[in-house]
Image: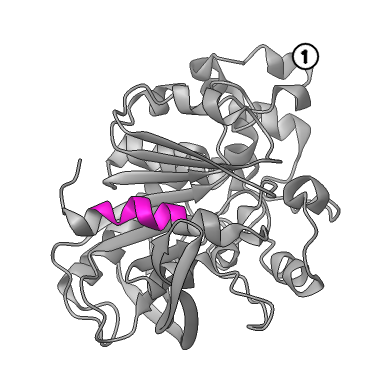
Amino acid sequence: MQRGEIRPGRSSATLVRHPAQWKGDGAVMSSVQTVRTSFVIDVGVVAPEGGHQVVVDVFAPSAGVEDVSVLWWLQPGGGMSRRYWDLDVPADVGNYSFARYLASRGFVAVAIDHLGVGESSRPADGFSLTSEVVADVNAYAFDQVIAGLRSGTLVDDLPPLPGLVSIGCGHSAGASLTIYQQARHRSHQALCLFGYGGRGLPSYLDPELVRYANDPEALRRDIVDLVRARNPDPLPTLPRGNSELLVAVPIAESVHEALVAARTNLLAVAGFSTMIPGNAAPEIAMIDVPVFIGHGDKDIGAPLHEVGSDFSGSDDVTLYRLAESGHNHNVSPNRERLWGRVVAWADAFRCDRKPW
């Protein structure tokens, strides 16, 4: 592959039923076909040695949908591949694909496997995958994708989208990486953060780690050594049995199977750092675009209102708590309430291309 080259992979089309308009608890139903195409992106110019490529799925409305003006850049959380955004569940059980939901509403959605996880390359040294490094690779991949969409050269039957703008969206540790990407590269016009708590998980820390709370400079200096001392594998796979904490509500067996199929290894360094309170405080302080923060009512981490107050650099912060949801909101029985709420928030882009 050439540097920056994007190579197409598999393609599929799906008919998705969705609310045509968000009207509180009511909706009008319609059907729109969405198309998913996988791409392999060469990132060798910015990645650590051995980190040759990342894989993304692009979800686009079928031909004929008007005003495709917003791209969602979807980053999965720890232990999840890009398939978290496109859970493969039988249609009679329901739609569990946030990516297809977005595409069916006229957005382009792109889900990425971070370098080191899923189908993306594993660098020679997995400990090199700090939050900063992963964010830089993701930003480079994002630049290639949005350039291809704007020029009309990426997806067949999708015309050039020269005015395309983007929303950076991440779940859990993927939300943290979204913040790092925005602070370092200013890729997006808004951020949507699911299950994000920048205050870490202090109750899970040992006394040595507690000393790093709210000291991001010291944490970044020592993070690789701290992780290496606790786990010799920089890309470990979590043992089964964590779903009760993350799901927290009853789900159908087919939904559980889809969630298991989306599992992958962790980015130990980047993921571990998110557990330390204040780990991304400098980056959060740099966020000056609109921010949507969504939590489940049975979520983990800091309370929603506390997390929202950290984003003092943004003049537009929206908080939303989803009823009957654990940390993995995409499997909540109320997931489409959350999805509908964020689509209503994002529709401001289509009402006014520069709403903020």
Q: Quadrant of the N terminus?
A: bottom left
Question: Is residue 46 visible from the viewing direction of this image?
Answer: no
Image: 209 above or below 176? above
**Residue at image coords 41%, 60%:** 23
Q: Residues within 10 Å of mark 1 (few under 14, many from 20)?
A: few
Q: Residue furthest right?
A: 241
**Residue at image coords 48%, 64%:** 26
Q: Residue furthest top?
A: 211
Amino acid beneath label 1: Pro
How far across and down, in percent of the image, does residue 112 sit?
Answer: 47, 62
Of the pair 76 and 39, the residue shown nearer to us:
76
The magenta-colored residue range is 341-348
Q: Secondary structure at mark 1?
A: helix
Question: Is residue 113 visible from the viewing direction of this image?
Answer: yes
Left or right placement of residue 6 versus residue 179 in this view: left
**Residue at image coords 58%, 24%:** 199
Which color mode does the image show? one colour
How far across and down, in percent of the image, does residue 114 sit?
Answer: 51, 56
**Residue at image coords 76%, 71%:** 257
How far across and down, in percent of the image, does residue 233 sit?
Answer: 73, 46
Residue 317 sits in which quadrant?
top left
Residue 8 on the magenta segment:
no
Of the pair 164 and 249, the residue shown nearer to us:
249
Q: Taken as a whole, is the magenta stretch helix, strand or loop?
A: helix
Residue carrying label 1: 207
Q: Quadrant of the C terminus?
A: top left
